[in-house]
Image (tube, coloured by chain):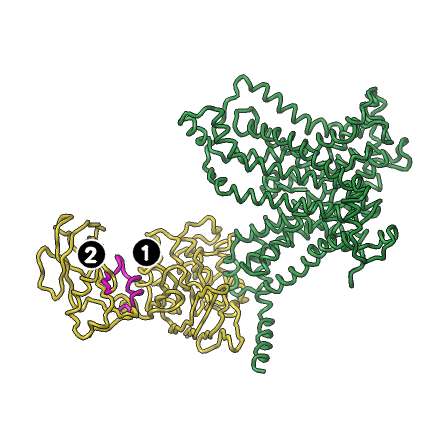
Chain colours: A green, B yellow
């Protein structure tokens, strides 16, 4: 009895202390919330691979809820497994491998030119180089299809066809364009990674080898290459996870010829086939995603021992290009044209033409921007008057806006709890669970959320088709970045400023309002703006969740492409890119943060 | 006024690390008490528990007879309600507030009206000679100025108890002396209770009315500074306080046991109990010839380290190096033989449990 009374008294006391330090209580609430929002969906996805769902039960004649190996067998072993899974799987590996083969040498070469040589305008070049990485990955695919489209798919003719040259299928669709477009998007990653590695690599390391009598070949083989190995491995893994996670490019360029990669195969299975099979494919993407990140972490740990050695005081000597200056400059200009000017230029140009590719005065028009009725497209209006576009713009702003706010505050809260309760189980759990969405490729994460939230659970109704589901999934998917930056920011601040306020007599809410939030203003702003930018261009994550009432700009682009409304789809892409540029510039202005260095988002 | 009593205070981190082990300490009202010990000995944890930032695992804590914490009662007065002042090692000034705003924060929390706050801030800033810095931000201040603002911030609320966590360790040597003087002056002016955590014995010795020497979460000795220096309660205290450290000769060690035995005739009744003998360097005299002192021993003169005010001499006795501090320059060359000697009352004796034996 004595013990019982004491325990109650202690509980009462803990409760009375709550207003002063609710850290623990908030921590527990947060743990429970993240368990429900992140862990449960992923577990539901796993369960869906072995349990019959409502939609499948009708087709396969097994009652809903029965455990079965049917989906696993169908995906991996049946006669249709070749089409459902294996072909897309091998093609994904092939495309990813080819993208690595193009993007990594390209990124490495330009990184070397910019960091290690006296290439004129290298500052400007290095800023421009990251532009393809700022704009949505499928922008290139939309531009490509506008140019190379042929009669295989409907709608307006492509530019080349209008000009009299009909591109064969292998140029218009399938492996080649997908590889080229993905490479153009991914090479800035390699550029950044190699650039950082080269920048931190002291020239004196090479010079010491030279002093010791090493030839140029020996220096590159024994000194430079081993030091660049981490950058190489990281770019490799990043490229893979990018390809694995990107939906738009293979959808736009592959669907017409039934060239499916894992993300599009998953989407197809979900939309027209069996959700059970889709769950199996989603689990495979999750598995690959997890192993890629695990590998990356292993390598990072393995190389951390020498990676910091260069440090900040590294001396980087630039090598004069001499006679090679002009060719190098030329190469750089061509690459910038190919990756920025031509794709974006094409997109903009097509929106001013009735028939893209026909260069006559009367063919030019403002209809696709300002027109209230478009002769060629019954019932459609120009960009600024088009109800579909305007609604999708509103949706995008609402969804990405709310998601980024939610994500920013959640991330800060996770950071706060983790730093305030160091070494506790709550902190370790929050760290790991908030990181989990990072391991799961976007489309797999969407699939998981869909299978969990699409049906009513207790007091929570089915969320399918609601804006709230999109906000929720988006904020959770970006939570890893927000919570990591939250943890970093809180660690930097330390506990003392808040403890000093406690000593001065300030309660929790006052400490938050007067000390913590003002000190974290910048971090919070970044933690909101980065997800906002990502959210405005997000496609893979939302494609399965968006419904006719909740189309986002990015999914609206795909609808227009499906209908063959080239100009409208391109105008929408231009709109998205414009918004992203404005957001990025204002973020750089507001926070002084550099997008390229701060946010290496992966699929 | 403000007497702090700690009764059987315990604190463990994780499952195995005992930070504070059954601590009993009474800090009298108006005294200036230092917690002295090497890093990791539990002194900062003790301070944080008194402030209420850490919760003890067991024991009781009183301020002026009022219960602040009790494990068995399940009582815990939160930091915000304790009304103490705490100066952090790295100052923890709020970087987004000016000096005046930093200092006025605590007053604001107490609901003091604006005009009164302004006056009080002015008063405190003047007391610490930083009234010209009111509108600066912490990043625009030097280390010493930041230190003064951190002090002013806590003094502003006029706490009965002021807790200082190694406040001078981030300052350079000259500023440290200046701030030591300042702290002592403040204590004499304000007359509040100060608990001062430091690993710097010079700070503890020069500032405090009482010093508590801590080691492995326990208090080894709690006494006025001079008592600690002159009669260390045990071997660890003797070794920790004093620089260069006390010279020890122990029964168990190979090289020094001959020297150790040479001391025993001086303490006829204690020969069995004594386990270690200690002599402070400044109590070790040198002479070229065997002196008349009750104890002397031959040694080889190794080298001399002049500090300017005195000379630290290292000597070799049976393959062991010991130190002596001289007020005058020694006229002996390295390698020459000298005689070391001391007076009986300067010899410290410790038993097998490392406890001090009072020889008289």
Q: The magenta stretch spans which residues? A: B231-251
The residue closer to the viewer here, B164 or B58, is B58
Extreme residue toward the bottom, this view: A1
The residue closer to the viewer here, B44 or B209, is B44
- Residue in the picture at 44% in, 55% down: B90
- N-term mark: 1 or 2: 1
Label 1: which residue? B177
Where is residue A128 shown, x and y percent of the image? 63, 31
Quarter location, residue A534: top right
Q: Quadrant of the N terminus of chain A?
A: bottom right
Q: Secondary structure at mark 1?
A: helix
- Residue in the picture at 78% in, 39% down: A82
Where is residue B327 shown, x and y percent of the image? 17, 56
Q: Secondary structure at mark 2?
A: strand
Label 2: which residue? B325
- In the image, A184: left or right of B176? right
Marks 1 and 2 sit apart, C-alpha to C-alpha, by 23 Å
């Amino acid at each position: 009895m004595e013990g019982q009374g004491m325990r109650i008294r202690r509980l009462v006391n803990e409760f009375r202390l709550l207003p002063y330090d609710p850290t623990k209580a908030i921590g527990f609430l947060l743990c429970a919330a993240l368990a429900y929002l992140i862990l449960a969906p992923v577990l539901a996805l796993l369960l869906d691979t072995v349990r019959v769902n409502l939609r499948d039960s009708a087709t396969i004649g097994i009652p809903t809820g029965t455990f079965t190996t049917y989906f696993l067998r169908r995906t991996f072993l049946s006669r249709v497994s070749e089409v459902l899974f294996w072909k897309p799987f091998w093609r994904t590996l092939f495309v990813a491998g080819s993208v690595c083969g193009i993007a990594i040498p390209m990124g490495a070469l330009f990184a070397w030119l910019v960091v290690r040589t006296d290439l004129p305008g290298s500052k400007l070049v290095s800023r421009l180089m990251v532009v393809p990485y700022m704009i949505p990955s499928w922008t290139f695919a939309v531009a490509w299809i506008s140019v190379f489209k042929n009669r295989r798919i409907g709608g307006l003719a492509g530019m080349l066809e209008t000009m009299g040259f009909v591109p064969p299928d292998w140029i218009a669709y399938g492996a080649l364009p997908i590889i080229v477009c993905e490479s153009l998007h991914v090479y800035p990653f390699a550029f950044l990674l190699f650039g950082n590695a080269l920048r931190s690599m002291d020239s004196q390391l090479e010079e010491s080898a030279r002093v010791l009598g090493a030839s140029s070949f020996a220096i590159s083989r024994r000194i430079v290459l081993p030091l660049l190995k981490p950058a190489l491995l990281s770019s490799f893994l990043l490229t893979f996870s990018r390809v694995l996670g990107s939906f738009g490019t293979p959808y736009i360029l592959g669907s017409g010829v039934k060239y499916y990669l894992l993300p599009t195969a998953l989407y197809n299975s979900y939309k027209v086939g069996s959700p059970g099979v889709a769950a199996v494919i989603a689990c495979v993407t999750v598995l690959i995603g997890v192993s890629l990140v695990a590998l990356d972490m292993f390598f990072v740990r393995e190389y951390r021992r020498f990676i910091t050695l260069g440090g900040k005081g590294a001396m980087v000597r630039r090598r004069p290009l001499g006679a090679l200056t002009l060719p190098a400059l030329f190469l750089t200009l061509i690459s910038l044209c190919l990756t920025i000017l031509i794709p974006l230029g094409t997109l903009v140009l097509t929106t001013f033409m009735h028939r893209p590719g026909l260069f006559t005065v009367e063919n030019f028009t403002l209809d696709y921007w300002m027109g209230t009725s478009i002769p060629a497209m019954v019932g459609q209006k120009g960009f600024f008057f088009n109800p579909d576009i305007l609604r999708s713009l509103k949706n995008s702003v609402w969804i990405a806006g709310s998601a980024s706010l939610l994500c920013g505050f959640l991330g800060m809260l996770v950071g706060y709890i983790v730093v305030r309760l160091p070494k506790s189980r709550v902190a370790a759990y929050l760290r790991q669970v908030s990181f989990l969405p990072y391991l799961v490729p976007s489309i797999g994460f969407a699939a998981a959320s869909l299978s969990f939230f699409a049906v009513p659970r207790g007091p929570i109704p089915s969320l399918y088709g609601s804006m709230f589901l999109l906000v929720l999934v988006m904020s959770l998917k970006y939570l890893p970045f927000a919570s990591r930056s939250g943890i970093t920011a809180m660690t930097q601040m330390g506990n003392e400023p808040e403890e000093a306020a406690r000593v001065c007599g300030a309660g929790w809410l006052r400490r938050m309002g007067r000390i913590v939030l003002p000190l974290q203003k910048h971090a919070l702003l970044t933690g909101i703006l980065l997800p906002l930018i990502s959210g405005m261009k997000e496609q893979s994550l939302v494609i399965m969740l968006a419904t006719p009432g909740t189309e986002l700009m990015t999914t609206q682009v795909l609808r227009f492409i499906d209908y063959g409304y080239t100009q409208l789809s391109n105008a929408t892409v231009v709109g998205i890119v414009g918004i992203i540029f404005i957001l990025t510039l204002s973020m750089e202005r507001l926070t002084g943060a550099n997008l390229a260095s701060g946010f290496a988002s992966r699929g | 006024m403000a007497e702090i009593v700690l009764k059987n205070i315990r604190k463990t981190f994780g499952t195995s690390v005992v930070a504070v082990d059954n601590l009993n300490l009474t800090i009298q009202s108006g005294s200036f008490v230092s917690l002295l010990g090497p890093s990791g000995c539990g002194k900062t944890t003790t301070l944080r528990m008194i402030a209420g930032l850490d919760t003890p695992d067991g024991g009781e804590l009183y301020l002026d007879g009022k219960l602040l914490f009790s494990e068995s009662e399940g009582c815990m007065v939160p930091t915000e309600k304790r009304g103490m002042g705490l100066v952090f090692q790295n100052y923890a000034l709020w970087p987004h507030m000016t000096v005046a705003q930093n200092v006025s924060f605590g007053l604001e929390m107490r609901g003091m009206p604006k005009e009164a706050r302004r006056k009080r801030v002015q008063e405190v800033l003047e007391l610490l000679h930083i009234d010209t810095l009111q509108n600066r931000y912490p990043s625009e201040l030097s280390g010493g100025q930041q230190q003064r603002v951190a002090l002013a911030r806590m003094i502003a609320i006029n706490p009965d108890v002021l807790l200082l966590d190694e406040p001078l360790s981030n300052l350079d040597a000259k500023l440290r002396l200046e701030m030591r003087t300042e702290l002592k002056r403040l204590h004499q002016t304000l007359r509040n209770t100060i608990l001062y955590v430091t690993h710097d014995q010079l700070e503890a010795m020069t500032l405090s009315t009482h010093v508590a020497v801590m080691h492995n979460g326990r208090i080894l000795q709690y006494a006025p500074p001079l008592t600690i220096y002159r009669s260390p309660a045990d071997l660890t205290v003797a070794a920790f306080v004093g620089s260069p450290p006390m010279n020890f000769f122990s029964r168990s060690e190979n090289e020094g046991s001959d020297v150790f035995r040479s001391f025993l005739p001086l303490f006829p009744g204690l020969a069995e109990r004594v386990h270690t003998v200690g002599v402070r360097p400044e109590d070790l005299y040198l002479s070229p010839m065997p002196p008349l002192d009750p104890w002397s021993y031959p040694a080889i003169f190794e080298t001399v380290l002049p500090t300017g005010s005195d000379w630290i001499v290292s000597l070799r006795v049976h393959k062991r190096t010991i130190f002596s501090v001289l007020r005058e320059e020694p006229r002996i060359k390295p390698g020459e033989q000298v005689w070391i000697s001391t007076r009986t009352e300067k010899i410290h004796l410790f038993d097998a449990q490392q406890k001090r034996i009072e020889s008289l």
